[in-house]
Amino acid sequence: MLKQFATAFLLAAAFAAPHAHAAEEPTYTVGSGATYRPFEYENPQREIVGFDIDVIKAIGAAEHFKVKVINTPWEGIFATLEHGDRDMIMSGITITDQRRKVVDFSHPYFPAEQIIVAPSDSKIDSLASLKSLKVGVVASSTGDISVSGVLGKTNPSIKRFDSTPLMLEDLSGGGVDAAVGDVGVIKFYVKSHPDKHFKLVKDASFKQQYFGIAVKKGNQDLLDKINAGLAKIVADGTYAKIYANWFDSDVPTLPAQ
């Protein structure tokens, strides 16, 4: 009788083990401001989607944790970590020394440099070659600062816009000869409008910046999970597939993970 009971117990434990493992997967809340297409935005079904969302879900799958993405306004997003309302924030956040004072950042997951976009038949090959041209920028952006440094801040040849899509529509219509803006937003626009023939031009003077995932200062356990998952999805090609889906096949090489 004892032997039968022991056998039954072992069988029950064997069948229960997978379910127990699944139940042990933690769920982490992710604060993300859903207004920065294509990194995070609401689709018509009011679901938060985007490149960032796909990346953090892939990281979670690699490290056996789930994520709950919560639409979080940019103003005050960092405070949600300090107050414990969010476990991490991922919202196209540029890693800076100033921000490192209040949060801990993951390894970089996206190079957020500026890029020049121009008609594919133009001879533009650098920032310096924009000097005699009409150039579009988003007002007060990093692109605005870069172009102002070359053309002069008050140069009437600089045309300032409220958003990247408006700037690129004007470029399409010939209102400006070129434009400078965030590489991710511009690549997504180009991919979404295959009928518009643009070329992208890099310039060595553009400062190299990266996006990172932020956690509360000192939350090393979660930070280690995020970094380990990021390294895994880069190594197995998942990251490259996500990047190509949202942008193009020119997948960047991230700093050593």
Image (cartoon, helix red, strand yellow):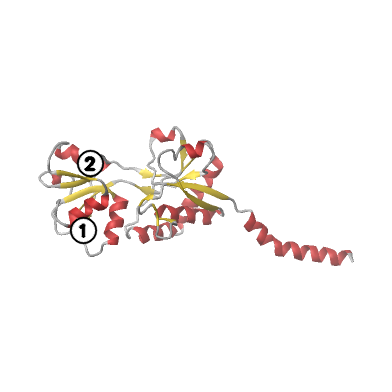
| Crowding near the residue tagged with mark 2, few <14, some 14–19, many ≥20 C-alpha atoms within 10 Å | many
**Which residue is tagged 1?**
198
Of the numbered discs 1 and 2, the one sitting upstream in the chain is 2
Kindly report which numbered mark, 1 or 2, lies closer to the viewer in this rendering: 2
Q: Amino acid at mark 1?
A: Phe
Q: Amino acid at mark 2?
A: Asp
> Would residue 29 be visible to someone looking at this image?
yes
23 displayed left or right of 51: right
143 displayed left or right of 19: left
Image height check: is 196 above or below 147?
A: below
Using the numbered discs, state the Cα–Cα distance from disc 1 to disc 2 in whole angstroms. Answer: 20 Å
- In terms of image quadrants, where is residue 209? top left
Image height check: is 157 above or below 170?
A: above
10 displayed left or right of 112: right
**Which residue is tagged 2?**
144
- In terms of image quadrants, where is residue 137? top left
| Crowding near the residue tagged with mark 1, few <14, some 14–19, many ≥20 C-alpha atoms within 10 Å | many
Dot 2 falls on a residue whose secondary structure is helix
The residue nearer to you, when weighing 169 against 192, is 169
